[in-house]
Image (cartoon, helix red, strand yellow):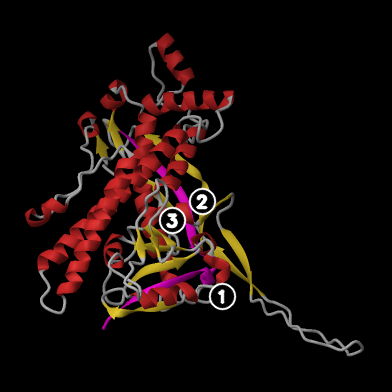
Amino acid sequence: MSKLMTKTALLAAGATIAPMPRAIAGSRVRMDGTDPKALIAQIQAAVKEMRDTNDQRLDKIEAKVDPLDVAKFDAISANVTDLEKALEGINAKLAASALEGTGGHRPRSADEEDYAKKFFSYFKDGQSEHEIKAAQRTGIRAAMTEGSNENGGYTTPVEWDRTITGRLKLISPMRQNATVQAITSAGFTKLFTDRAVGSGWVGETASRPATSTPQFTALTFGVGEIYANPAASQTLLDDSEIDIEKWLASEVEAEFERQESIAFLSGDGTVKPYGLLTYVTGGANAARHPWGDIKQTVSGKAADFATDPIIDMIYSLPAAYAANAKFYANRSSLGAIRKLKDGQGNYIWQPTFVAGQPSTLAGYALVDMPDMPAVKADATALLFGDMARTYLIIDRMGTRVLRDPFTNKPFVSFYTTKRVGGGVQNPDAMKAMKIAAS
């Protein structure tokens, strides 16, 4: 997030998709980012072309592989990913619109409306409504502001917290799929049992000696603090016609989502969450959970995926977790997975043809998780399991903002913080795939 924002900084260009090489530009499908039906039709057309290209590439393998065929497949595959992302974006925007209106939560009470009004006044020019009226009468602006505390400390409006938290759940793949729990203390401790309950068969009059009793182990989930400290010029705050609260919330939301997504997968647990991938066999936290590590399957193909190990991975997951299981991989892995076929020559990846529904791999939903490792030797590039049963996200309080007009004059800084933690709560509910080195 930019440290200093002025009026001109609000004029940002929208994201665009990089053009494909000239030699394969004809494979590009023009994307309509507003009509879900048109996007689905484009996905169908692109998938057909992608699979035809892959079949042609396979036919040439025994002779000589044309590099243009490989490049064409990769370009079309990337285009399919972009189309699916656009489809997901429409759903997220609709959900976010409902969240920002009254459709995403209950209407605000009179007290909340008054609180939000006072917060906006404080946020815009550092004065409470009472101070503004006093200043109008006396012509004097107070050096201290009222805020939510008597000394002008942290200010946390109900709507600010709800909006950022709600939108994070919409855009973060981990928050959408994991279990999220709010806590009211500095940390969270969860009890686990070793399930060592003794039992035995006995006759009607046989003695019944004591059996073994399960033992409990406590696992602590600490929280770290994530912060952002953007600044806007006082002139912008005075003259802007946009909703400053909503604009800054969207900036903080995007940055917090980026930082959280990285930490939820690879965080080392030091002032940040314990990343899920660190619990995989051989990882830094593989021995942390009392139930053991997250077991992994080797891909069976050097620096790539293969169909049979993926099937093995599916059936290595206990049936109790299969109903809500999904695959998790990044963009480069999607391109490799789309080439895989079963023994009858059928592709095991299927695109989405319904708005709001994900693509599937061997019948299970496939989630695009950008911060997963890329496909390369020894990388854990694919996860499969029930993320809600596997990973626990801890939220302490909400999002807080401190208005600072003094440190960096003439800019006003908005020091925003959120305390969050996370870690694996059930390693049995997730399996991992490691890419073979050779």
Q: Which residue is drawn at 58% across and 26% down?
A: 109
Q: Position of residue 35 (x, y in %)?
A: 32, 38
As measured in the structure, the alpha-carbon distance from the residue carrying label 2 to the one carrying label 1 is 24 Å
Query: Is the residue 31 above or below the residue 190 in the image?
Result: above
User: Mark 1 highlights which residue?
Assistant: 291
Q: Residues within 10 Å of mark 2 (few under 14, many from 20)?
A: many
Disc nearer the start of the sequence (3/2)? 3
Instruction: In this rendered view, identify the residue nearer to me: 214 or 306.
Output: 306
**Tag 3 near tag 1, CB within 8 Å:** no
Give the labeled residue for mark 2: 395
| Mark 2 vs 1: CB contact within 8 A | no
Mark 3 or 2, closer to the camera: 3
Could you say where residue 394 lies in the image, as x and y percent from the top left? 52, 55
The kind of residue tagged 1 is Trp
| 358 vs 430, nearest the viewer | 358
SS label for mark 3: helix
Q: Give the range drawn in magenta.
A: 412-438
Characterize the local packing of mark 1: few (<14), some (14-19) or many (20 or more) Cα atoms within 10 angstroms.
some
